[in-house]
Image (cartoon, rainbow, N blue to C red):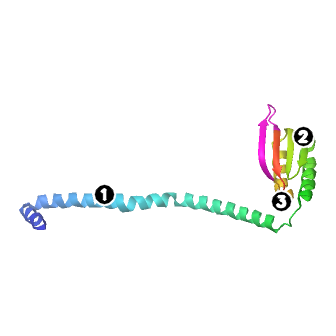
């Protein structure tokens, strides 16, 4: 096959040899661009954005790690201590918009007209201070933009 190509090349006039050489060069450059340079440049274009995204993700993970370590370093609480703390935070954050009922290792909080900010702050405090986790939530937003419904929380085990 190589000898056939050499034979055909020798039969071409110098002008045709230059044109075939130029065509082969254009095809070789196009292949080099599409297979090597274009993908590399595309990666370079998005690298900064991906780097910023990964940095933000790393910072969030480090923040979550610090929160987890802070929670682990807190002393263990009994369910009685947790329910007392929970009742105090309900009175402090939600006031008259919430009623609390403790039944064994479950706490039911009934909301009527709680503001989103107060509910968010209360849930954060309940999680960090009393170490309770929501196990069930049936919440609806009323026309005024306030929260109504029931939250069931689990107290820490004995």
Q: CA distance from mark 1 to mark 2?
A: 70 Å
Image-quadrant location for residue 5? bottom left
How many neighbours does mark 2 have within 10 angstroms: few (below 14), some (14-19), or many (20 or more)? Answer: some
Q: Nearer the viewer, mark 1 or mark 2?
A: 2
Q: Residue at x 77, y 67 (%)?
A: 69
How many neighbours does mark 3 have within 10 angstroms: few (below 14), some (14-19), or many (20 or more)? Answer: few
| Dot 1 and dot 3 residues touching (CB under 8 Å) | no
Question: Residue 141 at what x, y percent from top left?
Answer: 78, 36
Residue 30 has which mark? 1
Q: Is residue 149 magenta?
A: no
6 relative position to 34: left or right: left
Of residues 13 and 61, the one drawn nearer to the viewer in this rendering? 61
How many neighbours does mark 1 have within 10 angstroms: few (below 14), some (14-19), or many (20 or more)? Answer: few
Q: CA distance from mark 2 to mark 3?
A: 28 Å
Is 157 placed above or below 96 here? below
Q: Residue at x 51, y 57 (%)?
A: 46
Residue, disc 3: 157
**Which residues, given as a range, are shown in magenta?**
133-148
Judged by its main secondary structure, the magenta piece is strand
Is 89 placed above or below 10 here? above
Question: Residue 122 at what x, y percent from top left?
Answer: 85, 50
Indicate the secondary structure of the residue bearing disc 3: loop
Residue, disc 2: 97
Of residues 57 and 109, the one drawn nearer to the viewer in this rendering? 109
């Amino acid at each position: 096959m190589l000898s056939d190509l050499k034979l055909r090349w020798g039969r071409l006039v110098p002008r045709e040899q230059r044109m075939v050489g130029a065509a082969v060069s254009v095809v070789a450059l196009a292949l080099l661009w599409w297979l090597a340079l274009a993908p590399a440049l595309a990666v370079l274009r998005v690298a900064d954005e991906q780097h910023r995204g990964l940095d933000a993700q790393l910072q969030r993970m480090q923040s979550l790690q610090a929160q987890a370590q802070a929670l682990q370093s807190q002393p263990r609480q009994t369910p009685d201590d947790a329910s007392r703390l929970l009742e105090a935070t309900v009175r402090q954050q939600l006031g008259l918009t919430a009623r609390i009922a403790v039944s064994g290792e479950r706490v039911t909080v009934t909301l009527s007209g709680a503001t989103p900010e107060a509910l968010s702050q209360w849930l954060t405090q309940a999680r960090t201070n009393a170490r309770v986790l929501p196990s069930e939530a049936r919440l609806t937003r009323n026309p005024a933009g306030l929260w109504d419904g029931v939250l069931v929380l689990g107290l820490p085990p004995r």
